[in-house]
Image (cartoon, grey):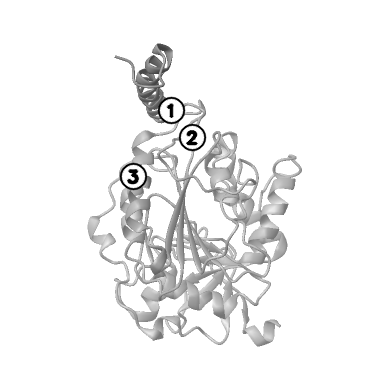
Amino acid sequence: MELPGQSGYARHRTCILPILLSVAVMFLVKVGLDGMQHGASMRSTFVQMEPPANCKVNHPCEYQGVVDFRVIVMTYNRNESLEKCLRSLEKVDTLVDTMRVEIWIDRSGRGEVDNGTVKVAESFRQRWTKPHLGHTCAIHIREKNAGITGQWTDTWRPKLDSKEIGLLLEDDIDVSPMAYRWLKAVHAKYDDRDDVSGYTIQMQNFRFHGSSKPATKVVPKSDSVFMYSILGTWGFSPHPKSWRNFQDWVHDARDNNKIEPIVPGLDQLNRWYGRFKRHQSMWEMWHIYFSYINKLYCIHPNLKAYTGMDNVMLAFNRQEKGLHYKGTNVLATDAAKLLSHWDASLVKFPERTIQFAYNGTIHGLLSSSEYS
């Protein structure tokens, strides 16, 4: 029996439309899953993708908005390591400031994306995103392989005259809940200087180049920080102006093969660069060279010697198996040494900050007023 006003063709079309829609939905879901599982060139439809148009491989990413604290997490295929890193970020005291986490997932040389890593990132995004608390997150899947060098140099370009604080992390770094408190204070103290390359939260295993003594045996106990020509990559917060200048310079000098970043007096690092050069996996040598020719220093924390305590670390490197480590287990007790309680004396910075040469000898001693 035909419904009033319907022909047989119309009735047939009405019945088949839901079937066609169901088939189309199933096809799109399958394509999305296949793209995630097999590294297809399309991006996952299940991940919130928010990169501005200029955030591509070999182009430093300048984000559309400004937040107080932007954390860049670089990852590839270590989903369990990423999970640990992100769990530590959930505990960071933001002082009611806005904090945004940008998770950058690289592709393999064949264009594949690790599905487990994407799932961990998306799970964190759903847990973390609370706009009313100032917590936001975006996941960026590279359109092609960027490598560790591209991940470091191109995932955060601070806006001119911005007060935004950035923190660049690889996924094997755990961060202290007090890391932002320290970074906010140290940026406020030293950002007006033009001889600063950035700030590191690395304290673990730090030694001056060519020295067998830990820095805690060299830097005065009275100083909560010191300046050193070489950055610490186990959690690095660039000086905004210096970082923009570095990005402009490195894309010209490195991409056009203008120089080799060989620094006089750094024989061991120069040899390491020679080993890793073919893989373009030692990006920090370019930063060290840039700091050398521009007389820049990285601000390092000296909290262990300053406080006389062990549990004052701002970051912890698990040294997971990957590009630079074979997966040697780091003592789990070391992770417990992350700073968990705040004391205002931790950011009582010296009036005159020591500048150390590569080998740990004193290179200079300047206050902000003397410098300016």
Please state which amino acid type lies under the numbered disc 2: Arg
Specify the quadrant that holds the C terminus.
Answer: bottom right
Task: Identify whether 360 is placed above or below 13.
Answer: below
Count neighbours of disc 1 (C-alpha within 10 A) and say few if under 14, some if 14 to 19, many if 20 or more: some
- Give whichever of 104, 5 is nearer the camera: 5
State the CA–CA distance, disc 3 to disc 1. 17 Å
At horizontal 29% and vertical 14% (from top left) the residue drawn is 1
Count of marks placed on residues: 3
Q: Secondary structure at mark 3?
A: helix
Q: Which residue is mark 3?
A: 120
Count neighbours of disc 2 (C-alpha within 10 A) and say few if under 14, some if 14 to 19, many if 20 or more: some
Please state which amino acid type lies under the numbered disc 1: Gly
Q: In which quarter of the view is residue 32 placed?
A: top left
Can residue 265 be seen here? The reply is: no
Residue 333's disc is none
Count neighbours of disc 3 (C-alpha within 10 A) and say few if under 14, some if 14 to 19, many if 20 or more: some
Residue 161 falls left or right of residue 185: right
Q: In which quarter of the view is residue 331 placed?
A: bottom left
At horizontal 45% and vertical 45% (from top left) the residue drawn is 48
Residue 194 in the image: state x and y as whole percent.
68, 72
Q: Which residue is mark 1?
A: 35
- Give whichever of 51, 289 is nearer the camera: 51
Q: Which residue is mark 2?
A: 43
